[in-house]
Image (cartoon, rainbow, N blue to C red):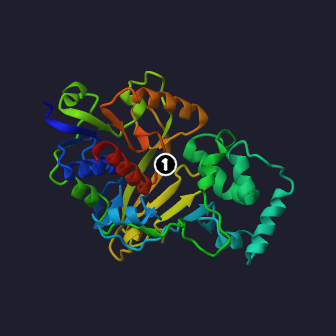
Amino acid sequence: MKKYDFLIVGSGLFGSIFAYEAKKRGKSCLVIDKRDHVAGNIYTKEVEGIQVHWYGAHIFHTSNPEIWQYINQFAEFNRYTNSPIARYQDEVYNMPFNMNTFHALWGVFTPKEAKQKIEEELQDVQIENPKNLEEQAIKLVGETIYEKLVKGYTEKQWGKKATELPPFIIKRLPVRFTYDNNYFNDRYQGIPIGGYTQIIEKMLEGIPVRLNCDYFAEKEELDALAEKIVFTGPIDQFYAYQFGELEYRSLRFETEILEEENYQGNAVVNYTDYEVPYTRVIEHKHFEFLQGGKTVITREYPDTWTKEKEPYYPVNDEKNNQLYQTYRNRAKQDQNIIFGGRLGQYQYYDMDKVILEALNCVKENLN
């Protein structure tokens, strides 16, 4: 007899939801994490009375009322609206691209005028079927916006020329002909008052958790403890890279306490010119509308991924997706292993999609 029904590798959102739902159904779980804390990349840590998003800004948003109700079991959310600012050299623009952006760029006032400016820029550019990100972006917003607000940021983020990146990456970028600085169109949006870590801690109440525990260093002993494994790390690492390495992008963070009340006047400022090495600066107190005292900022640097670094973003181009499919087919042969989350499923997921995937996984494996 095994000691646990499930060994859950990773205490992020996917693994913690699975553990919480399994416990409700009378199943026993052991959760392990290689870091010294729970919550994965949504981990928040209090510094100077401010909840610091330790691994980059996380704004919860969804249009699914069931997902919104589910996450609200664990925390009260504030009314934070994501309205990032883009800084290009000495110029400042609103994001997402909207009438405020177009007015600052061209002095236009109406949607008709803004569309005319974009159409004028496209007259000399014949792009029917965009073959890369550069062509897709220019077709969407014209050359001025592409050069100032897309090109440098994107090439920093992915570590490749925009002409080498697939066009679908830029399709997530909102473009609006309204004076609306809300980045998301979702019905529900906010940040948990008191940070995200409390959500995971509540999910894992009464469930044994081992931190600073490297699954691969103790694999034989850990595998012997449970009937099934829920693995939320990189699927290629699980199979010892037997078919080759999937590509990821990593990040590096520099967090600093400043002896001033308000550093940049906004939670997120994107730096879109290539010469600035970081992609954005996050000022965490603005997520919860805090006044007075000191402030904490984080500079976020894109980084080339190696096996020694944390994988943050899958590189979902055709080559990597085909390789992932090979690993996925291999995984189907293992009845006792469930892969989940961004890394286990090699997919970029927002938090609401992670919750949905986790709950679907629960239905498939626990009901």
Left or right: 347, with 166 as reference point: left
In the image, 330 versus 46, the foreground residue is 330
Residue 298: give x, y in percent of width and height: 42, 57
Query: Where, by quadrant of the figure, is residue 30 drawn?
Result: top left
Task: Report the amino acid beneath label 1.
Answer: Tyr
Residue drawn at x 50%, y 31% is 325
Residue drawn at x 15%, y 31% is 2
Residue 168: give x, y in percent of width and height: 63, 47
Res. 275 visible in picture: no
Res. 364 visible in picture: yes
In the image, 225 versus 141, the foreground residue is 225
Badge 1 local density, few (<14 within 10 Å), some, or many (20+)? some
Residue 236: give x, y in percent of width and height: 42, 30
Q: Which residue sits furthest right?
A: 124
Left or right: 92, with 280 as reference point: right
Query: Where, by quadrant of the figure, is residue 87 drawn?
Result: bottom right
Q: Which residue sits furthest front?
A: 367
Q: Is residue 318 above or below residue 270?
A: above
Query: Where, by quadrant of the figure, is residue 85 drawn?
Result: bottom right
Left or right: 301, with 228 as reference point: right
Residue 224: give x, y in percent of width and height: 19, 28
Which residue is disc 1 drawn over? Answer: 301
